[in-house]
Amino acid sequence: MRKELVEQIKNDPNYQELVAKRSSFSIILTVAMLVVYFAFILTIAFDPKLLGTPLSSDSVTTIGIPIGMGVIVFAFVLTGIYTKRANSEFDDLANKIKNSVKDN
Amino acid sequence: MQRALTFLILSALTLFASDAIQGEVQKQGLNMSAIVMFFIFVGATLGITYWAAKRTKSAKDFYTAGGGITGFQNGMAIAGDYMSAASFLGISGLVYSKGYDGLIYSIGFLVGWPIILFMIAEPLRNLGKYTFADVASYRLKQGPIRTLAAFGSITTVILYLIAQIVGSGKLIQLLFGLQYEMAVVLVGVLMVLYVTFGGMLATTWVQIVKAFLLLAGATFMAVAVMAHYDFSFGSLFSHATELKDASIMSPGKLVSDPISAISLAIALMFGTAGLPHILMRFFTVSDAKEARKSVFYATGFIGYFYILTFIIGFGAIVMVFQNPQYLDMAKHAVDGKFPILGGNDMAAIHLSHAVGGDFFLGFISAVAFATILAVVSGLTLAGASAISHDLYASVWKKGQVDGMAEMRVSKIATVALGIVAIILGIAFEKQNIAFVVGLAFAIAASANFPILFLSMYWRKLTTRGAVIGGSLGLLTAVVLVILGPSVWGEIVMGLKDKEAVAAAIFPYKYPALFSVTVAFVGIWFFSITDKSESAKAEQEAFEAQFIRSQTGIGAEGASEH
Amino acid sequence: MSIFEQRKLIESIHPFGLLSPSVLDDLMEKMDIAYYPKGTLLISKTLSSIAFYIIIKGSVTEFIDDEVYNFYSSGDSFDADALLYGKTEGRFVVDEDLICYEIKKDDFLTLLENKDVQSYFLQDFITRHQQLKEYHNQSDLTPFLISKVSDIYLHNACIVNSGTSIYNALLKQKELKASVILVKNETAYAIVTDTNLKECVLLGKISVDESIEKIASKTLISIDYNDFLFNALLLMTQKSVKRVVVTHDGEVVGILEQLDLLSYFANHSHLVMVQIEKATTLDDLKNLQKELRNIIISLDAKGVKVRYITKLIATLNAKIYKKLFDICVSEELQQSCVLIVMGSEGREEQSIKTDQDNALIIKDGVDVEVFKEPMMRLNRYLLDLGFPPCAGDVMVSNPFWRQSESEYKKLIDIWIESLYGENLQNLSIFLDAKALCGDETLLENLKSYLHVSFQSRDDVLAHLAKAALSFETPLSLFSGFVLEKKHENKLDLKKGGIFALVHGVRSLSLEYKIDATNTIERIKALNNKGIFDKTFATELIECFDTLSSIRLQAMLEAKSVDEMNYINPKKLQKIEIDLLKDSFKVVNKLKKFLAFHFHLNMVS
């Protein structure tokens, strides 16, 4: 166990920034997903009729259909947002940390 | 072992019991042209896979010859792993029979992916570990953790295998007019052969090709259905409601009570991360950026595919339901209902015939069958590796065993898994396969996910906490499934629907809400009360592990393990 | 079997065919037929031989140091040496239930009174080997290197006590006709050669009455009596000495002269070595490649295993590198860098030169540019001397392969981040690095950095190992060869087997932090670590030997570098075809093992 290295990385501002930013970003996105999904599920559990409301009076299509599809699209969009930010910002930070470890 | 034995006895019982109601298994005349098409397409699928894998190796150079797999390709492969029999046959069958309820399943299967990307994929890749057991034993004690991890993985794998075996068994039964039991044995044997002899096959390419064919086939079916209704969902839905009733357009009986709904949601959402054959896919691509992209593309493909299955399910309602060609007329004459040949899971297969004739029926059957084989191979390998590597080599032999012996054990484990899957596949004949997969997810979410998640994020996790809590989670999940309506009510008591629920000792179909809670609370309690020296050391090791999981920098020095 | 048939069988076995009918009749009377079940240990170090065995049915394996050394089956006989010398290094174990003739030890020794038979058994191994070749009784795998130091003529050692005067010592030397004088003091020996005498007594004006100790040189190069002769040759080549002292249980038993050794081996490696040693300019080193080639051809013709040939060639090449390095790099700069060879050169597995892979690691803080000119020169010289250029430009002339230690570390980090294409290739080449001249610790540092960086990186290791599965083994489902139509229906041995074996073993060695670079040594180390079981390790080594030796034939016949890896199976002998097929099966077994071990089905 290389204690000094652990300490050094822990005190690296880039590391703290990476952990703080990525954690909060992951948590926000996770919570967003959970909220949307559980809102959907709990609606089904407690008020199934709500999703069974027709889109318009002469239509058989219920609002549950676009909402369900919407959850799928929402999940896809979230992964896109995360991937975009992680592939640029987070990776850059991680590389900075790696380089600073080497220079010592 | 106890658990496996119980299952064996239960399934043996049901084998005898099912003879009494054998009338349900309906054999039909052989559709020769579809069978010929089936063989041509299975052959062609294998051929394309071989060609695709070969093509990447044509480079002159020794090291670039293996070829890099891009995020897009790997996303396709992940989707291929995921769009198994359960997704295609099971969900379209659910939509066919229950309408909107099928969509609830699809959404649940999908939302696990963003969670994996945000919470699991990144640290897993940085740790450089393939399997759930490897990650969990990173700073915890190898022996107990690997034992537990192996049991969690094996249980999940077996349930997932059952779903695939049931799906392909019914498909083969329908296509070749075989007895269901015969069909299942046939599939099981094929599966073992495929894994044993195809162990070196580049499964990534197998999955890519099959995912592409499945997506293409499903797209064609959905477009053909929509073309009938001038691409108007409104007319499709209204025709469907005319044939069935308006209830198919809104959430129905499937998850009527809040506990079942939440339980299912938890299982589906967190189960994906606990599936032993999925985690490995983050390593297929050679860098982290491509790994993230592959999850993004996979989510896209899977989401698109579920939308297609929804349309296919409704397509089956309008084109297969009440169409005498696909109905079990003998039974229709008895009760006036409209049961389709081979059961609801075969709705998509019948629809393929309705929109594309024998030719397309052969194609879809072949693709579905090949997909199942590929998924099964990945699953069996993961299960066999849990037995040979975690249980045999690491725990039983304490690492004092050579690689060849481990490999031999893995081969034996493959055969054993095949046999168990066949027996249970026969026992689970009447279950909807999407539902069985749901059970696999429930086990994964209860036994594997809590340890995986906490080992990466919670400093205070100790071996004691993980082992006791994890075992409680696994045990609760398995016991509640056995005491629940599906096994106790339907398989053991031979009842159906409401009667089965009433007869069951545990009244809910899904155990996840209870078992996941038990697991988390158990792990938490037995970790914080663990005051041993080793627990302290494990907690101290967290920092280095966390740094590595965040940055990929190995800070644990040379004296690991 | 009738008596007549038995007699025919014995007659057909060399050298019994040389016996007169009456002697043969006599022999037949004395012979017993014996049966030994599978697993019986017939002869070993501790179990001395009681009879000469001629196999009728079944088979026997001879192990030396747990390595399969020879294989005897119907018609073969063993083991004359064990009977003649009363001991053996080998372990003879019955492999398949054995039915054999036994000639009792005494009868066998009587038999040896026959001149022809005696000459056969007492001949030195080379002639015996050739004789056997003529009789088609031996496969090419028969190890030439059975000869030990104890088998060869050793010169008397002239040993004097440390107090002896130079004069008296010289008298004793003359009496014993010894080439050197060994001076024995309480704990060790020192050596006095003609050169010492010349320099000290004739030129240095030391009196002949002085104690001999004064002119003795302390560095004594010795080899054990039971060691292989080939190692003695290697030792002489490495240390540039003309003789080595042979010891047995710590006592000097004689002197082994280079001349005797070389006439035994009958090749020109000493000439080459002397040529390299004496060279002061580049011109002196020219035409060496042809000499090296001749050495390879002659050693191969004598049945020397390819792994020993390549080792000798590697030693000679190292001397050339060292010479050039001395010419090109000033003494003070030499300690700020290390010259390394990589790839097949680093593994010491290159026989015929196909490629050069070399690099320079420069100490941190030293200006990298200072080395540019010397390295360009070194590269030019190497090319002049017939070292073929590297197609991938892995040469010291390329600034990429001429960097500081910390730059190499960054490179290693990059490899771990993304193992793809060129990175993978560079890492693979670098893994075989071996230091030749300069400060070796520079390479050691990088190797340990490599090991720490790859520690428990199962993912990256898998991507590395994956390359071993890049090419199909050219063996069909029904054990036929799969020929390459593009290459006149030939077999590519490198793609088909050697690469997978070398690369797979290399990947495992990185995972288990094995420092050896030579494939066979790596396999042995993996066996020691319990990754391979003994049987599999033996199979792999045999397989590697077979593939290398068949490939060497192709290389010697090839007219261009492109053809070197291709062999035409139609030209192989039956035994070679069988061995090749068996080797490919072992390669497939290794591939399956790699696929399983690294979970390769998930990354390819």
Image (cartoon, coloured by chain):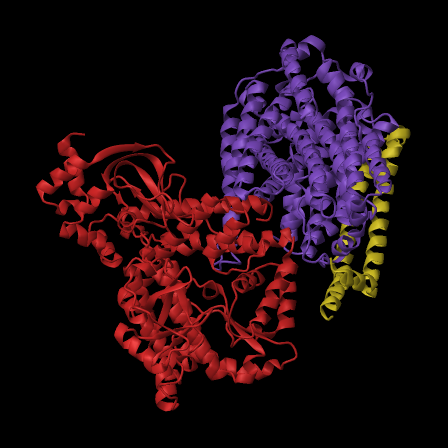
- In-front residue for pair A60/C302: C302
Looking at the image, residue B49 lies above or below residue C500 = above
- In-front residue for pair B69/C474: C474
- Give the image location of residue B395, x and y in percent: 65, 38
- Give the image location of residue C407, x and y in percent: 64, 72
Label the red chain with its letter.
C
- Identify which residue is drawn at 77% across, 20% down: B483
- Identify which residue is drawn at 83% across, 44% down: A33
Looking at the image, residue B302 lies above or below residue A8 = above
- In-front residue for pair B348/C304: C304
Chain A image colour: yellow
Looking at the image, residue B194 lies above or below residue B177 = below
Number of labels in the image equals 0
Q: Quadrant of the N terminus of chain C?
A: top left
- Give the image location of residue B194, x and y in percent: 53, 35
Quadrant housing residue B111: top right
Specify whether residue C479 is in view.
yes
Quadrant housing residue B183: top right
- Give the image location of residue B381, x and y in percent: 60, 38
**In the image, B261: left or right of C113?**
right
Label the purple chain with its letter.
B
Specify whether residue B318 is in view.
no
